[in-house]
Image (cartoon, rainbow, N blue to C red):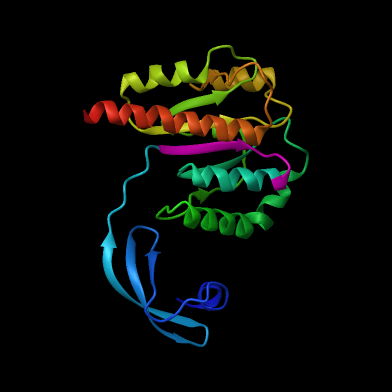
Amino acid sequence: MEGDEAKHLRQVLRAEVGQRYELSDGERVFLAEIETFRKGEATFRVLEEIPQSPLLLDATLLAALIKLDRFEWIIEKATELGVSRIIPVIAERSDFGLEKAVPGKRERWNRIALESAKQSHRVGPPHIGDAVRFPAVLESEIGFRLMLDENETKPILAVLREEADKNQGDRVSLLVGPEGGWTDAERSHAQLAGFVPASLGPLVMRAETATVVALGVLNAVWLDRKSRISV
């Protein structure tokens, strides 16, 4: 281990030779023991591979761009909730010019996702894609398509239970709108592209709150589904 990671281990965590840690190469997790410290470097001895449970589902979060500090919060929490990919979406009501800031934020966003993945003991962080305009998102083939919509009345739980009962796999895409909500044209185009609208109830939530609630419901439904299948 080199660079900032080794420095953090030695100077912040005060790690010592002989201590054991879980290490990940992005695909697997290992139990390893610190053997030596050198300047800017830590050497480990791998003891064994630690079996990992697969993620409940292969979830893609299509999140409309909102104020950047709140979008970073979405990245952090969505990582903890197990999403595989996060795609920033440029919606009609996304704040003007936000997409221009995305390239300069990618390194910071990836770092946030990595730290969150460590905290939640994930094998690796989600992939964070480039900002994509709304029409292009609708053209992607990415499993069952769910769209949060404050104008919808059908509860998300009912929608997801119907989908889970169809047993059509574990790939789900969740489309979440900006602070101002979807335009009528976006709603229409999304539904024509196969996105199923769902409601989180009568209260109006911030985009980041709605994202966390919806991902929590997704995980709960798929966990219940898998437990029933395994019985």
Q: Report x, y in % for residue 216.
A: 50, 33
Q: Report x, y in % for residue 230.
A: 23, 31
Any part of residue 135 in sight: no
Q: Report x, y in % for residue 76.
A: 58, 48
Q: Which residues are magenta?
A: 58-69
Looking at the image, residue 167 sits to the left or right of residue 116; the answer is left
Looking at the image, residue 216 sits to the left or right of residue 211; the answer is left
Specify the quadrant that holds the C terminus.
Answer: top left
Specify the quadrant that holds the N terminus.
Answer: bottom left
Q: Residue at x 49, y 41 (%)?
A: 81
Q: Residue at x 77, y 44 (%)?
A: 97
- Based on the picture, tell me whether residue 62 belongs to the magenta stretch: yes
Any part of residue 92 in sight: yes
Looking at the image, residue 73 sits to the left or right of residue 144; the answer is right
Snapshot quadrant of residue 202: top right
Q: How many marks?
A: 0
Q: Residue furthest top?
A: 153
Q: Report x, y in % for residue 184.
A: 68, 17
Q: Residue furthest bottom?
A: 38
121 shown above or below 54: below
